[in-house]
């Protein structure tokens, strides 16, 4: 499989060099040159498989140059359920949060480190890969867990000292392996992100590290190796629904996706292109609703106030993965994509032509939910159906209720226990201090399924407990690697 850049100036032969590169050399994102199609007979065959075999079959289409990729898939998903549950008339919930850190990022970040390890071996790359992430919560835990014990990988996750939930902090400071470091930064998320970017653009550091056998990498959500594994659960949910008799073979199904960087829902778009009978893809935003505005009028405008919300993983003004959709819906017009991205970069905004907007609206619906609506939805769904939503999933539920069309799958991206204090406030339960008390109280009040992986945190051995000022982040990396 060839991979081409959305900006027209780079291409790679095979998935191995594509996932090792991450971003394309021209600043664009890699997409498969040909989107493979899955016919009715292949869909029927998928229905008879378990999740791991479905993943092997579908990812095999994209990773054909990596014959051992099946091993990565089996290791990543052996103990990872992704069930789809009937919750309300006309709606199922797809629980993507049954991995080790109880958020949907595990689906990609359990697979990618293993795939990178294999890609390095195939390309005879012997340097140690150093993954650096700036995180406002979910990515940090998932990256530390996914990369922490993989040979040839080191991983540091920088998080704002006071900017993550108690539970997220606990996930980043328990033992994730000898080469996995969660580091509290004295600053806010922007400082943290700027600090990581400064390391990536510092040639001196990179040269010193290269001399010691290290190469920096980011593993962020624009890497094709993170997007591809997300395609699988759209197919898998459809198979499970048809197998359960909840959906006819040719009946369209809508997916409602709580969206931030546009990676999750874009994987749904690829599934649809591959032949999965998806009706509408519903893009749900929170108070930072740049995307739902874009789908309404074709103007992407990031020049607006940034709001911190109770669904922090969707607090994003620039959704990087949208670039891939623009490329496809413009008929792969790389020059048009370059123009839009430079307008975004220079002016903070761009607009698409009427034809492209029409094509987008032919597939996507979009809407948003504010903070009060999100809290009210958590409460209402709990009272009506006895199902507990986390705030991100509640945004999606609220948007679905306002515009429902076909039978829908609400894509659930986090366990409610991960955001226990906001969920408790929505249910008018008294506040508690600390992750363990919050989770216990929420369980006592609801008896809703608490993931084993979270319960294990209370007794997990402590890992590194590190902190630094945001100006000292480069030094922190060198010190950790020097002594690593
Ligand atoms: C990352 C994340 C999202 C947003 O997903 P995108 O792929 O960035 O659109 C939504 N909910 C949760 C809980 C997340 O961790």
Image (tube, rainbow, N blue to C red):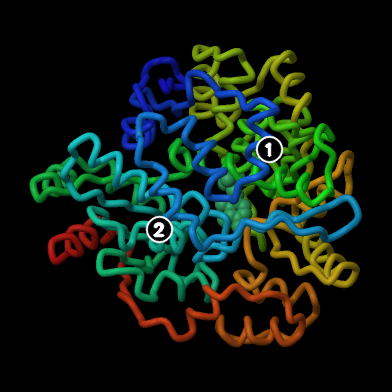
Which residue does the image show at 72% across and 43% down from the upper left? 238
Judge whether residue 316 can be spotted in this image: no
Q: Nearer the viewer, residue 33 or 266?
A: 33
Identify the image quadrant of the N terminus: top left
Q: Is residue 173 left or right of residue 205?
A: right
185 above or below 105?
below
**In this rendering, position of residue 256 left or right of residue 188:** right
Helix, strand or loop status at disc 2: helix
How crowded pointer 1 is (Cα within 10 Å; few <14, some 14-19, many 20+) is rated as: many
Question: Can you give x and y, in whole percent of width and height, for residue 14 in the image?
Answer: 36, 26
Pick the quarter of the image with the C terminus. Answer: bottom left
Q: Which residue is mark 2?
A: 146
The quadrant in which residue 425 appears is bottom right
> Badge 1 is on which residue?
291
Report x, y in % for residue 140: 44, 60
Which residue occupies 74% across, 31% down? Answer: 295
Considering only vertical position in the picture, is 374 above or below 64? below
User: x and y percent of residue 353 in the render?
Assistant: 69, 15
Tell me what residue is drawn at x 80 percent, y 80 percent: 428
Q: Are marks 1 and 2 in contact (CB under 8 Å)?
A: no
Please give the name of the residue rendered at 66% of the width and 25% of the height, measured from the top-left corner. Answer: 39
Q: Secondary structure at mark 1?
A: helix
């Amino acid at each position: 499989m060839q991979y081409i850049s959305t900006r027209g100036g780079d291409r790679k032969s095979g998935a191995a060099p594509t996932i090792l590169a991450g971003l394309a050399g021209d600043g664009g994102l890699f997409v498969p040159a040909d989107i493979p199609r899955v016919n009715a007979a292949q869909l029927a065959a998928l229905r008879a498989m378990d999740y791991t075999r479905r993943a092997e079959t579908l990812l095999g289409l994209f990773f054909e140059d990596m014959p051992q990729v099946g091993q990565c898939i089996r290791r990543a998903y052996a103990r990872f359920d992704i069930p789809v549950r009937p919750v309300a008339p006309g709606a199922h919930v797809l629980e993507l949060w049954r991995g080790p850190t109880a958020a949907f990022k595990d689906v990609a970040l359990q697979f990618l480190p293993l795939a990178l390890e294999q890609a390095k071996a195939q390309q005879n790359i012997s340097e140690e890969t150093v993954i650096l992430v700036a995180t406002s919560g979910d990515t940090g835990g998932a990256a530390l867990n996914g990369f922490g014990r993989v040979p040839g990988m080191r991983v540091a996750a920088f998080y704002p000292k006071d900017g993550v939930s108690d539970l997220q902090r606990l996930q980043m400071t328990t033992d994730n392996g000898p080469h996995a470091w969660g580091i509290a930064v004295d600053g806010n998320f922007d400082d943290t992100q700027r600090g990581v970017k400064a390391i990536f653009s510092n040639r001196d550091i990179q040269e010193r590290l290269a001399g010691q056998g290290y190469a920096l990498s980011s593993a962020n959500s624009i890497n094709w190796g993170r997007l591809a594994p997300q395609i699988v659960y759209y197919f898998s949910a459809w198979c499970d629904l048809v197998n359960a008799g909840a959906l006819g073979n040719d009946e369209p199904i809508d997916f409602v996706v709580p969206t931030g960087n546009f990676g999750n829902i874009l994987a749904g778009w690829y599934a649809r292109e591959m032949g999965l009978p998806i009706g509408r893809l519903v893009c749900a935003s929170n108070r930072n609703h740049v995307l739902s505005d874009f789908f309404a009028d074709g103007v992407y405008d990031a020049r607006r106030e940034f709001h911190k919300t109770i669904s922090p993983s969707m607090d994003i003004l620039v959704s990087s993965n949208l670039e891939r959709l623009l490329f496809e819906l413009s008929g792969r017009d790389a020059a048009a994509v370059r123009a839009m991205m430079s307008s975004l970069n220079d002016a903070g905004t761009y607009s698409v032509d009427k034809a492209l907007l029409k094509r987008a609206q032919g597939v996507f619906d979009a809407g948003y939910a504010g903070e009060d609506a999100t809290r009210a939805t958590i409460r209402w769904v709990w009272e009506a159906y006895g199902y507990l939503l986390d705030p991100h999933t509640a945004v999606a539920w609220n948007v679905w209720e306002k515009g429902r069309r076909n039978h829908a799958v609400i894509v659930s991206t986090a366990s409610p226990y991960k955001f226990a204090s906001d969920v408790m406030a929505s249910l008018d339960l008294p506040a508690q201090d600390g992750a363990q008390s919050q989770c216990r109280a929420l369980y006592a009040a609801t008896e809703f399924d608490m993931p084993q992986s979270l319960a294990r945190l209370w007794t997990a051995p402590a890992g590194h407990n590190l902190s630094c000022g945001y100006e000292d982040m480069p030094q922190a990396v060198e010190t950790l690697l020097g002594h690593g």
